[in-house]
Image (cartoon, helix red, strand yellow):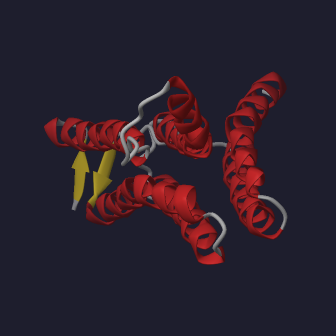
Amino acid sequence: MILYYSVDMWLMMGLTDGIFGMVMTLLIFGMALPEIQILSEGDFIAFIHSLIPSIGITLVSFILIASFWIYHHEFIKITGFDIPYLWFNIFFLACISFIPFTTSIIGTYSQFFVANVLFGLNIFLTLIFFTLMFWYADKRGFLEAELSKKERKYTYHTFLIIMGLTIIVNLLDFNVSCNFIYLFFLVPVISTIRDIMFKMKT
């Protein structure tokens, strides 16, 4: 059964935006206050310095979540949906909801390969379910406008590039340096450049 643009559509979009907002807010709770009492300015400066890795990975995750939110509003403008589409959307949101947890893990245990894998897998699965959601909406004719062959190619290639970047970052982050996690800041740069170039050609 297909559900068309109605109160149900607004409820689904409200749920999606609400979860994005909550997840982006929860990221900050991964940076805990010190367990010992700070008695001097030197101790406070040392504490702030110790937070730098956590602040960095939190910013990375915030940018990634913001990118997914932008993709959701940019690429998936729908006029209807059905039950399978809702499940794709729910699994996508479930992956988004786990990002604060995997962010805390990699922020604390980045020296362990499994910690890097969990974070990378979280981002990769988010991309997979988002791509499936886009593919299904396109296949079922739920998108507002019918896509041309060039538009489909541009969209899928964008997702594939980010998936490839996720795999590369995951490998470099563990095998070379944990600082390679900051390569994820390239996601909005890549997306923006591709969007500008695509619009210039059309």
**Closer-to-camera residue (140/64):** 64
Q: How many marks?
A: 0
Q: Farthest residue to the front: give it.
A: 39
Residue 135 appears in view: no
Query: Which residue is at 31% across, 64% downward?
Result: 87
**Relative horizontal placement of residue 183, taking residue 34 as reference (left or right):** right
> Residue shown at 54%/70% (left/top)?
118
**Residue positioned most to the left:** 7
In front here: 159 or 2? 159
Task: Residue 61 in the image: state x and y as whole percent.
Answer: 54, 45
Return the x and y of residue 88 as percentages of the image width and height. 38, 62
Res. 111 image quadrant: bottom right
In the rendering, at what x and y percent does residue 98 appear? 40, 59
Q: Quarter of the image holding residue 24? A: top left
Relative to 165, 84 lies left or right: left
Residue 73 at x, y percent in the picture? 46, 34
Residue at the bottom extreme, as displayed: 114
Give the residue drawn at x 42%, y 31%: 39
